[in-house]
Image (cartoon, rainbow, N blue to C red):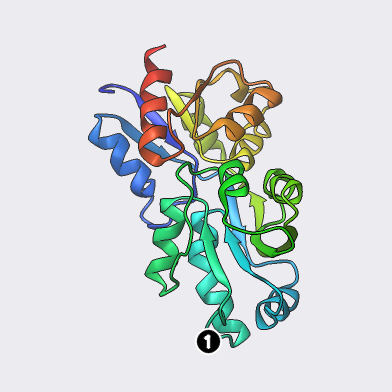
Amino acid sequence: MQGHTVAVTRPDSGGDGGGGRLGELLRAQGAEVLSVPLIRFLPPADPRALWSGLRDLRGVDWLLVTSPQGGRLLGEALAAAGVADLAGTRLAAVGEATARELRARGLPVDFLPTTATALSLGRKLPAQPGQAALHLTSQLSENTLRGELAARGVTYRRLELYHTAPAVLNAAERVALAGVSAVTLASGSAAQGLAALAGPDFDPLRLPVAAIGEQTAAAAWTLGFVSVTTAPQPSLEGLVAAAIKAVRS
């Protein structure tokens, strides 16, 4: 990866402009990293509805968290709602990165699928027909999890834990992004944000992109990206492997 610049489009949780953990992994492979977050995480549109839902978990057997951002924010939401514990409701995370964020906030994870996808979580969640699951996510969450659980007779409900909005890049950021060797995409929202940057001076669909999983890759293909490499496993390490392949292809 020497001599190549890879764009990290995830919001920089470290706040230092270095692309967070993904940036560290890319630099370890010799790449230069350009941190250009394409989405922003905002408070939910209706915080009171969120707090009300968290205060009353009667009849909810499982809480489902499907992003590291959700893992970071759930503890804050519970505190804001005045909820001291989950009162017997079990907690499932989509993957290890999400589970790590939850555990760091004192929230024990009761289930983690072997593959970090919503599809795997929906199929493998140890819920019985007639039980209920509450999905804490953003307003842009796809319906994969809902469909898989409904097919198993599990009642699905969704609460907006945070709001996802597109970031706005300045002219210098657009120029820098146009010159990278590859762009990493960790969500369909990031793919949409990148495609939305199209203009007379910049065609983002021509950039090689590395997608963290099949859903993100499918979103990129649908949007018209011409070179999409899918990670061999849906993890940051897998995303780095996909970025390496995208650069070399």
Question: Which residue sits furthest top?
Answer: 249
- Give residue 51's position: percent from left, percent from top: 68, 79
171 to 61, vertically: above or below: above
Q: Note whether residue 202 is visible.
A: no
Q: Residue at x 30, y 39 (%)?
A: 25
Q: Which of 239 and 41 is in front in this view?
A: 239
33 to 19, vertically: above or below: above
219 to 132, vertically: above or below: above
Please name the residue that numbered disc 1 is placed on.
84
Q: Nearer the viewer, residue 76 or 119?
A: 119
- Give residue 156's position: percent from left, percent from top: 74, 59
Q: Answer with the quarter of the image where residue 5 lies.
A: top left
The quarter of the picture where the C terminus appears is top left
Q: Which residue is drawn at 42% across and 26% down?
A: 242
SS of the residue at dot 1? loop
Tell me the crowding category of disc 1: few under 14, some 14 to 19, or many 20 or more residues within 10 angstroms, Cα based.
Answer: few
Residue type pointed to by label 1? Ala
Q: Note whether residue 143 is visible.
A: yes
- Give residue 95's position: percent from left, percent from top: 46, 50
